[in-house]
């Protein structure tokens, strides 16, 4: 099977590329712009594989998209290319609109044109899997039931609004033009190769460097945590068994407050690498001003996904966090290279006050 993955050099994308390359029946084309959050180093272990091809390009570039479809002739498309950090979307929303909305539109148009010219049998098996987020559903209270396939959209940040728009456009291209699409909405991912600005790697790296651990507000915001390998396995199975036009929710069934996650990470690192002064890493926790519009809680009901496809998360959160800590300890060169390029590890999303007008 020939698989086109957009954003395949990013955190989730690189894990998905590796998963497909493990199967010798699969050939993968990775189309990636290589923005700040992506790196060719993420796939250094497979670059010499004859079944893997990298094409540097922007999903907003129509000519690059046409080249990818015409020359590679994919059987499936997994669309992961996206701006994905909420904090950055608060500071620079236009970047998210361009990539997540306009870029998705161009990709859908290229896929549709390709699909409409396929032989009947190949068209029958073609799939376009659009990978999205649970954040499009808004914020839950502590008493609300988890998100499910029928939950109404209620995005509350520039990031989630841009992803919600791309979800709706994808659905429209299915219902209006017949493009065989499947949409997935996942919870917060964690695991190897995650960019250092994200919550879990930031906390791990700051512990290693014995720097403050910045926690927004009171640390009581709740997320459902999903290991990236569980997520990618779900995507593979959904691509094989999922129904055209359906939405599948993918979560880890592991709700935790942000403070619980940080405390857990500190406990793990206390055992593996005791602090130089003998104190607890928890002493480094520092509560900082909350970001604007910070959603209280996300939770995902995966029962329909399991019922339809047989997938369920297998990686226990505590073990997954321990494995992730060890990965960052063992791969200092990887994240230190990113820090050396200029990322300073600061929390973002605080540069535009809700009372200030957006810059034109």
Image (cartoon, grey):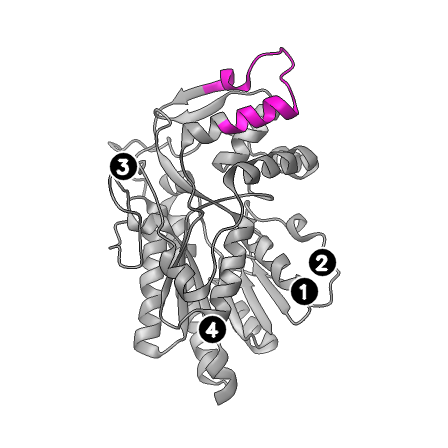
Residue 26 position in % (x across, y down): 64, 70
Name which quarter of the figure residue 335 lies in. Answer: top right
- Write the residue at 61% across / 38% down: 323
Q: CA distance from mark 4 to mark 2?
A: 25 Å
Residue 188 position in % (x across, y down): 44, 44
The quadrant of the rendering that contains the C terminus is top left
Helix, strand, or loop for circle 3? loop
Residue 87 colored in magenta in the image: no
Name which quarter of the figure residue 207 lies in. Answer: top right
- Whether residue 191 is visible to the viewer of this picture, yes or no, is yes
Q: Which residue is mark 1?
A: 52
Q: Disc count in the image?
A: 4
Q: Which residue is mark 3?
A: 142
Q: Nearer the viewer, residue 99 or 184?
A: 184
Q: Nearer the viewer, residue 276 or 314?
A: 314
- Write the residue at 31% across / 55% down: 148
Q: Residue extending furthest right? A: 48
Q: Which mark is residue 47?
A: 2
Helix, strand, or loop for circle 2? loop
Helix, strand, or loop for circle 4? strand
- Which stretch appears magenta? 264-285
Q: Is residue 14 left or right of residue 159?
A: right
Residue depth check, mark 2 versus mark 3: number of the one nearer the observer: 3
């Amino acid at each position: 099977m020939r698989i086109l993955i957009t954003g395949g050099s990013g955190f989730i994308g690189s894990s998905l590329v590796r998963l497909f390359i493990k199967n010798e029946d699969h050939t993968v084309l990775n189309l990636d712009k290589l923005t700040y959050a992506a790196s060719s180093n993420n796939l250094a272990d497979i670059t010499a594989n004859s079944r893997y091809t990298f094409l540097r390009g922007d999903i907003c570039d129509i000519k690059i998209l046409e080249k990818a479809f015409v020359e590679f002739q994919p059987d499936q498309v997994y669309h992961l290319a996206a701006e994905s950090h909420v904090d950055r979307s608060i500071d620079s929303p236009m970047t998210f609109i361009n990539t997540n909305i306009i870029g998705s539109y161009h990709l859908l148009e290229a896929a549709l044109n390709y699909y409409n010219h396929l032989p009947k049998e190949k068209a029958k098996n073609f799939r376009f899997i659009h990978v999205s987020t649970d954040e499009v559903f808004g914020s839950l209270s502590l008493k609300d039931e988890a998100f499910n396939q029928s939950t109404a959209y209620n995005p509350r940040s520039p990031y989630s609004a841009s992803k919600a728009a791309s979800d709706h456009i994808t659905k429209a291209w299915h219902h209006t033009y017949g493009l065989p699409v499947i949409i997935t909405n996942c919870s917060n991912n964690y695991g190897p190769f995650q960019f250092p600005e994200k919550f879990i790697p930031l906390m791990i790296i700051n512990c290693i460097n014995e720097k403050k651990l910045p926690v927004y507000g009171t640390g009581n915001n709740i997320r459902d945590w999903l290991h990236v390998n569980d997520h990618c396995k779900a995507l593979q199975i959904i691509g094989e068994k999922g129904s055209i036009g359906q939405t599948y929710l993918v979560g880890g069934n592991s709700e935790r407050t942000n403070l619980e996650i940080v405390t857990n990470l500190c406990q793990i690192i206390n055992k593996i690498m005791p602090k130089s002064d003998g104190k607890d890493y928890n002493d480094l926790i520092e509560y900082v001003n909350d970001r604007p519009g910070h959603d209280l809680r996300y939770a995902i009901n995966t029962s329909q996904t399991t019922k339809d496809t047989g997938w369920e998360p297998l990686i226990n959160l505590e073990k997954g966090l321990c494995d992730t800590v060890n990965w960052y300890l063992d791969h200092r060169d990887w994240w230190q290279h990113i820090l050396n390029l200029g990322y300073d590890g600061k929390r973002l999303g605080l540069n535009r006050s809700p009372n200030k007008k957006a810059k034109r």
